[in-house]
Amino acid sequence: MNARASADESQVGLQFSLYPLRQEHVRPAIEAAVQAAAAEGVDVTVGRLSTFALGGEEAVFSAVRAALDAATSFGPTVMVMTLSSGLPSAETVAEIQGASIG
């Protein structure tokens, strides 16, 4: 997730991946979806294989709808997503990552 010191239980995490189908170029649909999600007030981080977003429940669900609508405006699209609540703090994630490396 993006740089937040901690995420409380009222926040929801979203991870989504888009697969534009039968489109010559996939980038426009993906970029439009990411921009649409961000416009809904969630904190968005683009990864290599998926996009992550963090925000309140209403904003996250609005972001899902906006991202899907934006992507499908370019043509058929598959969207895979994962939602999670009760996210660990950034410190906890860093501690786990540090333990798994060393």
Image (spheres, helix red, strand yellow):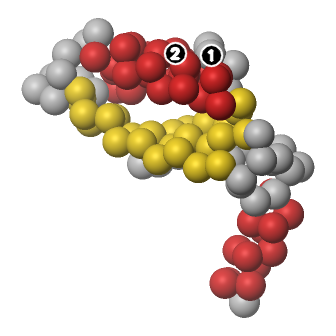
Q: Is residue 89 visible?
A: yes
Indicate which disc residue 91 carries.
none
Residue 87, placed above or below residue 26: below
| Residue highlighted by disc 2 | 36
Identify the element where label 1 is drawn: loop
Q: Is residue 7 left or right of residue 73?
A: right
| Residue at far left of view | 22
Q: Nearer the viewer, mark 2 or mark 1?
A: 1
Q: Is residue 32 left or right of residue 89?
A: left
Identify the element where label 2 is drawn: helix
Q: Is residue 56 left or right of residue 7?
A: left
Amino acid type of disc 1? Glu
Indicate which disc residue 40 carries.
1
Asked if labels 1 and 2 touch by Cβ distance under 8 angstroms, the answer is yes
Q: CA distance from mark 2 to mark 1?
A: 7 Å
Residue occupying image coordinates x 42% and y 42%: 81
The front one of 32 and 69 is 69
The front one of 48 and 62 is 62
Residue occupying image coordinates x 47% and y 47%: 82
The front one of 24 and 89 is 89
Q: Is residue 28 visible?
A: no
| Relative image position of residue 7 (x, y in whole percent) | 80, 47
| Relative image position of residue 50 (x, y in whole percent) | 45, 44
Residue occupying image coordinates x 74% and y 84%: 99
Other-residue count near label 2 (Cα within 10 Å), few / some / many at <14 / 14–19 / ≥20: many
| Relative image position of residue 72 (x, y in whole percent) | 28, 16
Q: Quadrant of residue 96?
A: bottom right
| Relative image position of residue 55 (x, y in whole percent) | 70, 32
Amino acid type of disc 2? Ala
Other-residue count near label 1 (Cα within 10 Å), few / some / many at <14 / 14–19 / ≥20: some
